[in-house]
């Protein structure tokens, strides 16, 4: 059976790719951010997941404003990236797990989430930057199932809807027969706004509220409207929707194992967290 070993969420600011390429990990600007990954690497060495289900938002590389699914699931055995114009190296391809993708898609549609299924899908910095941060070695010891959430063009799905999507993905994984160890990843956020009169907007207090409540009280956060989320976290801070889906997919007893919060990385309040997920069946058997 599949086991959900836990969750990781982190920002995906593109300039991190440049800092990695230029080995700036110890540079005073970058060090407080990169040191937040020491625990992530330690935890992964112990938990050894073999598949990552990644909730992220595409920024215009694969989907654009002409056709933008609210929710899309990758169903490929490999995902390539391309130059998005940020001046960072293009990522090497990432292996996909199409078998788990199809299981998740079948289960989601049966569960009334009518997702777009993508057998050919480019992944952008919202997947490649977190991958490079989480698994910094020359080879990725993991396959992915990427799940895209629209955070770009309104109307956006609500926090409540993304929490429910995550829960449906969690149920799908819990019913997946092949032995596999699965980590759930959410990317983006926390508060940031890249354009308009509020460009540079960051909201430390709201970020702290989100980080404090997401583990034990996700349903309280789910009551926040999209309008209020934009106001409180910035136009791009709505990437927190990916975090909510990640939280929803953890179906066991969830605990915070690690939190790093650092302002700013580029225009963004950068947060990195690790959550443990103790599966329900294991608890009942104990
Ligand atoms: C930045 C943040 C993002 O989430 C993104 O997708 C692109 C840029 C930034 O802060 O520079
Ligand atoms: Fe982004």
Image: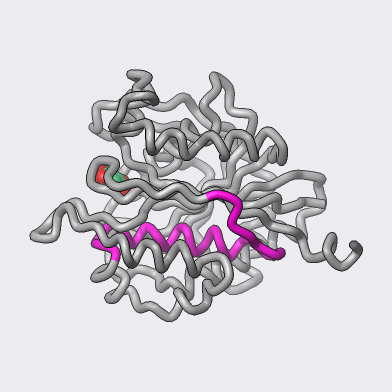
Which residue shows up at 46% across the image and 76% down it?
222
Image quarter for ligand 1 equals: top left
Left or right: 88 in relation to 175:
left
Looking at this view, is 43 or 14 the one in front?
A: 43
Looking at this view, is 117 or 7 the one in front?
A: 7
Looking at this view, is 197 or 35 the one in front?
A: 35
Q: How many marks?
A: 0
Above or below — where is 168 with respect to 194? below
Where does the image place residue 218, in percent across and percent down from the top left?
52, 72
Quadrant hosting residue 113: bottom right
Where does the image place residue 201, in percent across and percent down from the top left?
19, 57
Which residue shows up at 28% across the image and 48% down it?
268
Q: Quadrant of the C terminus?
A: bottom right
Quadrant hosting residue 48: top right
Which segment did they paint magenta? 233-258
Which residue shows up at 58% across the image and 28% down it?
140
Above or below — where is 118 with respect to 242? above
Which residue shows up at 54% across the image and 58% down it?
246
Above or below — where is 11 with respect to 50? below
Quadrant hosting residue 12: top left
- Magenta span has 259? no
Can residue 74 be seen at all in this image of the molecule?
Answer: no
Where does the image place residue 236, in percent across and percent down from the top left?
28, 57
Left or right: 122 in relation to 89:
right
- Magenta span has 254? yes
Can residue 241 be seen at all in this image of the molecule?
Answer: yes
Applied colour scheme: one colour
Q: Residue furthest right?
A: 285
């Amino acid at each position: 059976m599949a086991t959900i070993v836990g969750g990781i969420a982190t920002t995906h600011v593109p300039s991190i790719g440049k800092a990695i390429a230029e080995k700036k990990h110890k540079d005073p600007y970058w060090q407080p951010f990169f040191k937040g990954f020491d625990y992530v690497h330690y935890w992964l060495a112990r938990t050894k997941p073999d598949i990552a289900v990644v909730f992220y938002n595409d920024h215009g590389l694969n989907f654009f404003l002409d056709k933008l699914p609210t929710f899309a699931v990758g169903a490929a055995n490999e995902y390539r990236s391309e130059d998005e114009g940020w001046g960072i190296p293009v990522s090497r391809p990432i292996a996909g797990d199409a078998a788990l993708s199809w299981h998740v898609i079948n289960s989601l549609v049966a569960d009334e989430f009518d997702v777009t299924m993508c057998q050919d899908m480019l992944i952008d910095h919202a997947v490649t930057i977190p991958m490079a941060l989480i698994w910094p070695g020359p080879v990725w010891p993991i396959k992915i199932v990427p799940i895209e959430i629209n955070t770009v063009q309104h109307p956006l799905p609500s926090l409540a809807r993304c929490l429910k999507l995550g829960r449906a993905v969690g149920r799908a994984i819990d019913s997946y027969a092949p032995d596999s160890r699965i980590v759930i990843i959410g990317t983006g956020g926390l508060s940031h706004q890249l354009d308009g009169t509020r460009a540079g907007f960051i909201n430390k207090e709201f970020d702290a509220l989100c980080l404090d409540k997401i583990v034990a009280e996700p349903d309280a956060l789910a009551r926040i409207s999209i309008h209020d989320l934009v106001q409180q976290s910035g136009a791009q801070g709505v990437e927190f929707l990916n975090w909510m889906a990640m939280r929803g997919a953890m179906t066991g007893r969830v605990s915070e194992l690690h939190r790093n919060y650092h302002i700013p990385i580029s225009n963004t309040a950068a947060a990195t967290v690790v959550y443990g997920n103790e599966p329900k069946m294991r608890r009942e058997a104990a």
